[in-house]
Amino acid sequence: MRPSSVSLYDLQHWAKRAGFELAEDTLRPLAGYLDLLTQWNRVMNLVGTRTAEETFDTLVVDSLHLGGFLREKAGLPDAPSCWDLGSGAGLPGVPLRMVWQAGDYWMVEAREKRALFLSTVLAKYPLPGTHVFRGRAEAFMAGPPARTADLVVSRAFMPWPKVLELVQDQLTPEGVVVLLLRERLQDSPDWEQAVRHWRLFAASDYPVARTKRFLFALSRHNAPSCPS
């Protein structure tokens, strides 16, 4: 395997600039992933960024914040069943699994070329308990086998009310949906309806490229019953 063109020194510098210190066993596969993503992006337009540094600053940072959020605030079981719906180029899933490896993590992607990219990444940089499903989220959820989730992650998959509607019946009793958004849930016109059936129990915000991003964890546990 040829060395990555992304310098480990530069990558650690980008991480420190964002407030993170990455272990060497994270730096190497992350550099390789960024290198591979940059190569494929030249012909497939996987992401809107054009350099590894820009991708790190605007996209990978989401994954690093999400890893800390899941460790500290999500209240997940030790070995959760995790679904990343509409994984695209593996953001947040691939960098997330380099820093947080609890349970089984399924990256679900319907677009064939993107699913192929994800499989190529995992072949080069295996991540414990991490899998790719090539197909629609509905097909993945239907199984077989019958599937339930302790954690559903959604970033730019579909509008967040649709995500909640899609997964609500397949969460475990204390399952969590984590949404990565560019705006506050409470500022959305859909929030008043959602709060009747979902409990918001953790939230965080963080800077990304001179803007702000938001993480929200929601659960149906102890939420009011849905009307029949």
Image (cartoon, rainbow, N blue to C red):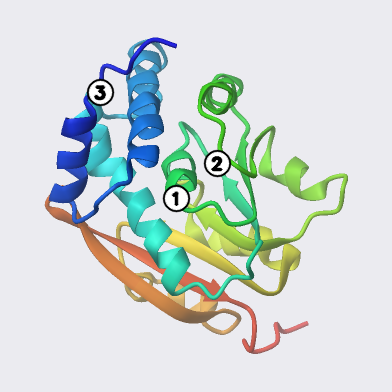
Mark 2, residue position = 86
Mark with earlier residue (3, 1): 3
Other-residue count near label 3 (Cα within 10 Å), few / some / many at <14 / 14–19 / ≥20: many
- Quadrant where the N terminus sits is top left
* Position above or below: 2 against 160: above
Percent position (x, y) of residue 122? 56, 28
Residue that appears at 32% across and 18% down: 4
- Residue beneath disc 1: 155
Q: Secondary structure at mark 1?
A: loop
Q: Amino acid at mark 2?
A: Gly
Q: Position of residue 107 (x, y in %)?
A: 59, 41
Labels in figure, total: 3
State which quarter of the image contains the C terminus: bottom right
Sequence-first tag of 2 and 3 = 3
Which residue does the numbered mark 3 point to in the structure image? 6
Q: Label 3 sits on what residue type? A: Val
Image x and y of residue 178, in percent: 49, 63
Q: CA distance from mark 2 to mark 3?
A: 26 Å
**Mark 1 or 2, nearer chain start:** 2
Q: Secondary structure at mark 2?
A: loop
Vertical arrangement, residue 175 with respect to residue 137, above or below = below
Q: Nearer the viewer, residue 199 or 104?
A: 104
Q: Residue at x 45, y 61 (%)?
A: 179
